[in-house]
Amino acid sequence: QSRVSVSAVLASQQFSHSMLDVAEYDGLFRPVDFSAANRELSQGAGLELGFASELLPRLQMNAIYRSRINMDELATIRGVHGQAADLDIPSRLRMGLDLQASDRTLFTVAVAQVFYSQVGAFPSRALPARFNALLGDSSSPRFEWNDLTVYSLGMRWQHESDLEFKVDFHT
């Protein structure tokens, strides 16, 4: 038996920039003010495609692909080359196996690839101003993300229908 699924992924990010301007930092600790006036909201959407198939009794293979989520630009922070910052969520691909050891116990093993290289990086305001000024110059370092591979092992145990114990390990 096999299943295919298609889902909409809706994302919302909230960014607050209070007290992040290092140029104004005078060495004194002040509480961060997360008032509504200093918040910015970014929203985006994507798709998730899933496939699951029973390979053997009690052994199931599953695969999920989630598209890149193109988030709205944030006006208060700037990207590497001075354009408005874009905190997009990268696409990912996950493949896994589920072994139903008993009616109550499930073991999982999976590998996922997160495609961070698809999304642009932006520097921190905490970096020295000289460094930020050089970004985009022909002598500047490359400022980009690397893709990430995540390996996962897990176990789920369910007691009746009211309690579930789950342990996961991710690299």
Image: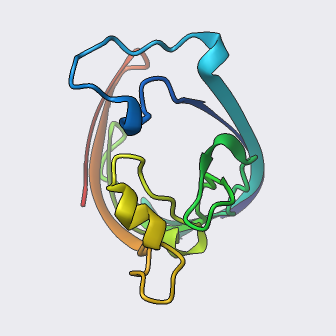
Total marks placed? 0
Q: Residue at x 69, y 60 (%)?
A: 83
Between residues 22 and 96, which one lies in front from this camera angle?
A: 22
Residue 118 shows in the view: yes
Q: Quadrant of the N terminus?
A: bottom right
- x, y percentage for residue 163? 35, 18
- x, y percentage for residue 139? 42, 88
Drawn side of residue 141 relative to residue 53, left or right? left
Q: Looking at the picture, does residue 74 appear above or below residue 31?
A: below
Q: Residue at x 59, y 73 (%)?
A: 118
Drawn side of residue 27 relative to residue 115, left or right? left
Q: Looking at the picture, does residue 21 appear above or below residue 102?
A: above
Between residues 39 and 66, which one lies in front from this camera angle?
A: 39
Q: How is the image coloured?
A: rainbow
- List the single residue furthest toward the bottom: 138
- x, y percentage for residue 61? 50, 68
Q: Looking at the picture, does residue 44 appear above or below residue 108?
A: above
Q: Looking at the picture, does residue 96 appear above or below residue 142?
A: above
Drawn side of residue 43 relative to residue 113, left or right? right
Residue 97 shows in the view: no
Q: Residue at x 75, y 54 (%)?
A: 46
Drawn side of residue 156 relative to residue 92, left or right? left
- x, y percentage for residue 93? 55, 69
Between residues 10 and 124, which one lies in front from this camera angle?
A: 124
Q: Residue at x 63, y 55 (%)?
A: 88
Could you say which quadrant of the image residue 66 lies in? bottom right
Could you say which quadrant of the image residue 3 lies in? bottom right
Q: Quadrant of the C terminus?
A: bottom left
